[in-house]
Image (cartoon, grey):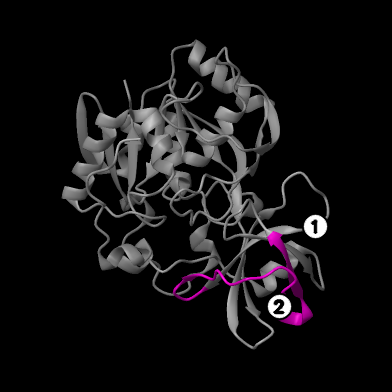
């Protein structure tokens, strides 16, 4: 992967949601990047930027209040972030992350017991995939989703200014709870914008990918995640491409799900389960033509996927333009529409 030459700026307002900046969701900025142009516009202009026959594929995962207050044996208060159930097992164990206010806590140990609200407990069983994450056995007084709704909050990182309501971490497409963090590329969509897209002849198709924690560090590949591509969506993708339309993924989560369901012939099939697919320039993409995505940190593994779609030169041009124009990154920032060719 080529190295993005300059990290995007992160001014103070990037740490506050658009609502706190006096902006509505449709005032999010959009940079359109293609070989022929770099266009600075508003996300509200998206219907005019697409053409009839295009297909937007969106993620319907709903964000869990996956951060729980916890206390260690010695009395230290800590946050336990739930990432995802342990893949391919049915024992109710979860992959979790221990965090302090200044970052990940790396001093967990196998067998350590954490006290959770209302008499809940979490036992650290073993490190997960050799990373700072842990497999944890949870003992809770009620079903997990109900427990989180009562005692959890949305996961936040240091770039966020305070705790925000969970609803700010949901997209208009969110229906099925399961993501540790918001599939944020879908956040600026509104019912009114979707109606304009449909009226212009641009279709919208759903799939599901429950995201784990996104705070990957240098050298860490994306973790396995749960996904589901319905038969109807697979058929709609194949039809759009057969008729000459473009398949536009709304977010990197959609790219990962579609590319996990595509065959070597380029046809997308109904699929569900766990995906471990890592998409980069060498592997490339087969099912996706364009991508709507946020701006990611320079050391983020997401940039491998963006380069697989855009190519190194277009991606570098886009990030230089965004940096110069003061675009905002992270989940409450601005967006990029990549149109490779």
Q: Quadrant of residue 19?
A: bottom left
Q: Is residue 205 left or right of residue 271?
A: left
Residue 120 belongs to the span the image colors magenta: yes
Count the labels in the image. Answer: 2
Q: Nearer the viewer, residue 23 or 157?
A: 157
Q: Is residue 228 left or right of residue 305?
A: right
- Distance (Cα) linking label 2 and label 1: 16 Å
Residue 255 location in percent, x, y?
50, 34
The stretch in magenta equals 100-126
Q: Nearer the viewer, residue 247 or 273?
A: 273
Residue 22 seen in the current view:
no
Most distant residue in the bottom direction: 75
Q: Nearer the viewer, residue 308 or 219?
A: 219
User: Residue at position x 59%, y 83% from top?
Assistant: 77
Secondary structure found at label 1: loop
Picture layout, residue 312 above or below residue 218: above
Residue 24 location in percent, x, y?
35, 57
Give the quadrant of the C terminus: top left
Residue 41 location in percent, x, y?
24, 42
User: Residue at position x 29%, y 66% from top?
Assistant: 13
Residue 318 belongs to the span the image colors magenta: no
Q: Badge 2 local density, few (<14 within 10 Å), some, or many (20+)?
A: many
Give the quadrant of the N terminus: top left
Picture layout, residue 257 above or below residue 296: above
Picture layout, residue 40 above or below residue 178: above
- Residue underneath mark 2: 116
Query: Which mark is drawn over residue 92?
Result: 1
User: Residue at position x 48%, y 73% from top?
Assistant: 163
Q: Is residue 85 left or right of residue 30?
A: right
């Amino acid at each position: 992967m080529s190295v993005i030459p300059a990290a995007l700026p992160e001014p103070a307002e990037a740490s506050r949601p658009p609502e706190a900046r006096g902006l509505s969701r449709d005032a999010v900025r959009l940079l359109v990047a293609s070989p022929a142009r770099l266009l600075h516009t508003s996300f509200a202009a998206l219907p005019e930027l697409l053409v009839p026959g295009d297909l937007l594929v969106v993620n319907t995962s709903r964000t869990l209040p996956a951060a729980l207050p916890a206390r260690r044996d010695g009395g230290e208060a800590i946050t336990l972030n739930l990432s995802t159930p342990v893949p391919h097992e049915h024992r109710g164990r979860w992959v979790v992350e221990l965090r302090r206010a200044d970052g990940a806590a790396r001093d967990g140990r196998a067998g350590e017991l954490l006290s959770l609200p209302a008499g809940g407990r979490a036992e650290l069983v073993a490190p997960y995939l050799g990373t700072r994450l842990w497999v944890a056995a949870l003992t809770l007084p009620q079903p997990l989703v109900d427990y989180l709704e009562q005692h959890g909050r949305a996961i936040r990182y240091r770039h966020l200014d305070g705790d925000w309501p969970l609803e700010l971490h949901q997209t208009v497409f969110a229906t099925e709870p399961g993501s540790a963090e918001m599939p944020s590329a879908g956040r600026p969509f509104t019912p009114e914008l979707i109606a304009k897209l449909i009226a212009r002849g641009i279709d919208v198709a759903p799939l599901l990918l429950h995201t784990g924690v996104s705070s990957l560090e240098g050298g860490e590949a994306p973790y396995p995640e749960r996904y589901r591509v319905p038969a109807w969506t697979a058929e709609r993708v194949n039809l759009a491409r057969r008729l000459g339309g473009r398949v536009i993924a709304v977010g990197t989560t959609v790219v990962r799900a579609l590319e996990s369901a595509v065959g070597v012939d380029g046809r997308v099939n109904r699929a569900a389960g766990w995906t471990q697919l890592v998409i980069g320039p060498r592997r490339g993409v087969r099912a996706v033509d364009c991508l709507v995505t946020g701006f990611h940190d320079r050391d983020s593994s997401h940039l491998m996927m963006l380069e697989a779609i855009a190519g190194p030169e277009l991606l570098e041009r886009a990030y230089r333009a965004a940096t110069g124009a003061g675009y905002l990154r992270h989940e409450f920032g601005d967006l990029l529409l990549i149109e490779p060719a």
